[in-house]
Every structure is written in structure tokens, then in C-alpha cells.
Amino acid sequence: MKLTVLGCSGGIGGDAHRTTALLVDDDVLIDAGTGVADLDIDALARIDHMFVTHAHIDHIACLPLMLDTVGARRAKPLVVHCTVATEAILRAHLFNGLLWPDFTRIPSPNRPFLCFAPLEEGDSCAIGERIFTALPAEHGVPAVGYRVATPRGSFVFGGDSTTCPAFWDAVARIPDLRYLIVEAAFPDSQRELAIRSEHLCPALLAAQLPVHAGAFQLLISHVKPGYADETMRDLQRVAARHAPVMLARGDVYRI
Ligand SMILES: Nc1ncnc2c1ncn2[C@@H]1O[C@@H]2COP(=O)(O)O[C@H]2[C@H]1O
């Protein structure tokens, strides 16, 4: 399995910052933030599945645009996997015929560009040898993270989440974890904002990390633009034993 980071920033601006979008091999997206816009049209057309962590705009911004761009070239609908709660938000506030056309019914109800597939916390969905499992998250709106498992190992993407013991319980039960991607959106100097916006800062993250470093690599996502250096300095201080690395647009990981 090849994991390509199309975007992992908490905002936009310049070459470095694209919002959340992870490409698994060449046919599955986890979230569709602004990083998706860097794919060419053939690459967009190859995407058959998208797993949504939550409905915030920085995680779904390119979904409506890619459907309109490549829907007519594709032989089958893009399958969007998410919780029923997230589907309800996307239907009510995005694919509502006002903000964007309802691509679950057009060009025709029989051959739409988009279909939803429910996936609740704890549920799994196999796509080829890759098994996607929704994990708990806490972000003020319905939210999940994902484990992606293969016979050679797993990675976890926590999505956007503040303190969430159930997520860490689930992570502790993954014996073959290779990469753990979790957020630290704000530095410790912005702890109150991190709490208000249901994110993490390094001190809040460190309080949840296992006491001992695991065999996995700890990768940090969703840092807000302008705070990268300060956040990484904080992390090196409070989570040094886990040797955290900041995820970057263009990074590729293989399992
Ligand atoms: N109470 C708040 N005060 C200021 N900014 C906020 C608040 N809640 C959310 N935000 C910002 O709004 C953003 C929405 O997307 P994010 O969750 O990535 O990050 C969030 C914060 O940057």
C-alpha cells in the first residue's frame, strides 16, 4: 500500500499548505481537502472511494468539484464512505441543490456521480486487500478517524480530534501499527483555542500518548499555518520519546 500526502495542513497559503487529503494507492481518498486539487484529471478520475472523517469544509472542499470535473468520464459513481450523521450534514448543507447540485441524483438517479455508503465507528470496509475501519474521534461535529490495515501492517489517521480516550484505546489494540498520524493543530501557547475548537496542542497530545514509544512512527498533521516551528518545538519538548515528525505535503509512505 502506498500512502501519499496530498494535504495535511490546518489551512492554506503558498506551496506548503494544502488541507487534509490522503491518497491510498491511486484509487482511495481519505478526506478531500484542497490537496486534491493538485491531482491531474486522469488521477482524479481513478478515485473510486472516499472515506470522510468529518464534514468540515477543509476536509471535503474538493469533493463537489472533483465530482463535477470527472463524474461524466467515470463508469461508476464515486463511493463516499462516512457515518450516517456526516452523510446527513453533507446532504443538507452541500449537495442540496443550492450550494452544489445533488450528485446523488444527477445526471440521473440510476447513474449518479456519487453514492454514499454508511460506515459507523467500529465498522470495517474492505477494498481489495486494504481494510478501512472507522475509529472514535471528538471534534464537536460527528467525526471519526481511520485505521487502514493490510497483511503487511496498518496505519492510523486520527483525523481532527481533541482528547479522545476511546481513540487511544483502539490504537493500543493494533499490534501491527506502522504509522500513527495524529493532529496537533495549535502550539501550547494557543491551548485555550485548541480546546475551544476541539483540537489538540502538544501538551494535550502528549498527555494521551502511550508511556513507552511503540514500534510505530508518530506523524503530526493539521498544524495551523504559521505555527509549524513553535508546535514542533513544543512537541520535541513534551513528546521527545516518540520522535514526532511533521507530516508534509508530498510525503509518501509504503506498507
Ligand atoms: N471558538 C473558536 N474561536 C476561534 N477559532 C475557532 C473556534 N472554533 C473553531 N475555530 C477555527 O475554525 C476552524 C475550523 O476548522 P478547524 O477545525 O480546522 O480549525 C478551526 C479553528 O481554526
Image (cartoon, helix red, strand yellow):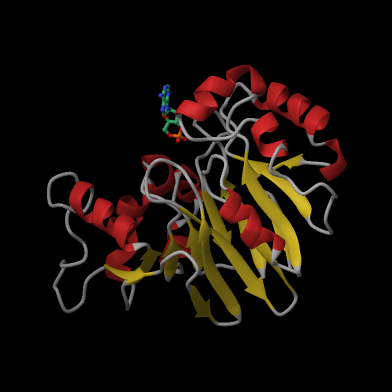
Q: Name the one closer to the observer, 107 or 140.
A: 140
The location of residue 253, given as percent across then percent down, is: 72, 58
The location of residue 142, given as percent across then percent down, is: 38, 50
Assign the C terminus to one quadrant of the image: bottom right
Name the residue: 36% across, 48% down.
55
Name the residue: 78% across, 41% down.
244
Q: Residue furthest bottom?
A: 128
Q: Name the one closer to the observer, 179 or 100.
A: 179
Q: Name the one closer to the observer, 43 or 174.
A: 174
- The quarter holding residue 183 reads top right
Ligand 1 position by quadrant: top left
Q: Is residue 165 left or right of residue 74?
A: right
The location of residue 104, given as percent across then percent down, is: 21, 66
Assign the N terminus to one quadrant of the image: bottom right
> Vertical placement of 104 versus 207: above or below?
below
Q: How many marks?
A: 0
Q: Is residue 249 visible?
A: no
Q: Is residue 79 visible?
A: yes
Q: Is residue 12 left or right of residue 242?
A: left
Q: Residue furthest top?
A: 189
> Vertical placement of 225 versus 19: above or below?
above
- The quarter holding residue 146 reads bottom right
Q: Name the one closer to the observer, 122 or 245.
A: 122
> Vertical placement of 123 versus 181: above or below?
below
The location of residue 58, given as percent across then percent down, is: 42, 40
Q: Is residue 215 left or right of residue 75?
A: right
> Vertical placement of 76 versus 80: above or below?
below
